[in-house]
Image (cartoon, rainbow, N blue to C red):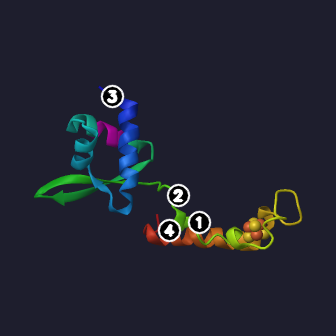
Amino acid sequence: MPKQNDLEQKALQIIMNEGRRGILQSELWRRINATSREGSRISIRLERRGLIRRERELHNGRWTYRLYSKKQPLSIDSILNCPCLTCEESDRCGGGGRISPNECEKLTRWILESIMKEKAQSGGE
Ligand code: SF4
């Protein structure tokens, strides 16, 4: 029988992979081969640790929870527009120099815009 921590890791990975769709908890229990009692404990623990959120949902006439990850894995899409990837100064850019990420307006603007976009997509959380 897998250890509790392994099950939590596995559950979290599956929830993260489901992204914005989330996953019904019963489906998750099936996939990690856990009983509903074990599964409920896992999801409550993950929620207490701030890793997921649970939302009530009516499914086939019964109330249950859909689980969403609060963190999403980094995707290629999320860094595609990073200005560093096409920057002419990238060879000379580095910590301590005249040109550095700490002082870069282009990078700062891109980071702020990415944060605003992410907030708008997740409903302002
Ligand atoms: S931090 Fe600014 S200057 Fe440095 S590589 Fe990125 S965009 Fe270019």
Say which residue label 2 marks: 74
Q: Amino acid at mark 3?
A: Pro
Mark 4 or 2: in front is 2
Say which residue label 3 marks: 2
Give how far apart the Cα atoms at labels 4 and 2 are: 15 Å
Regarding residue 108, the answer to whether it shows in the image is no
Q: Amino acid at mark 1?
A: Ile
Q: Earlier in the sequence, mark 3 or mark 4?
A: 3
Q: Position of residue 93 (x, y in %)?
A: 82, 64
Q: Is residue 73 above or below residue 40?
A: below
Circle 3 packing at 10 Å, graded few (<14), some (14-19), many (20+), is: few
Q: Position of residue 119 (x, y in %)?
A: 50, 68
Quadrant containing ligand 1: bottom right
Relative side of 118 to 61, left or right: right
Q: Is residue 40 above or below residue 122?
A: above
* Image quarter of the N terminus: top left
Q: Amino acid at mark 2?
A: Leu
Give how far apart the Cα atoms at labels 3 and 1 are: 36 Å
Q: Please identify the residue farthest to the right as the structure is shown.
A: 98
Q: Earlier in the sequence, mark 1 or mark 2?
A: 2
The magenta span reads 40-45
Give residue 79's mark.
Answer: 1
Q: Earlier in the sequence, mark 4 or mark 2?
A: 2
Q: What residue appears at the point 36 percent right and 48 percent down from the top-left corner?
A: 14
Magenta span: chief secondary structure: helix
**Does residue 71 show up magenta in the picture?**
no
Circle 4 packing at 10 Å, graded few (<14), some (14-19), many (20+), is: few
Q: Quadrant of residue 104?
A: bottom right
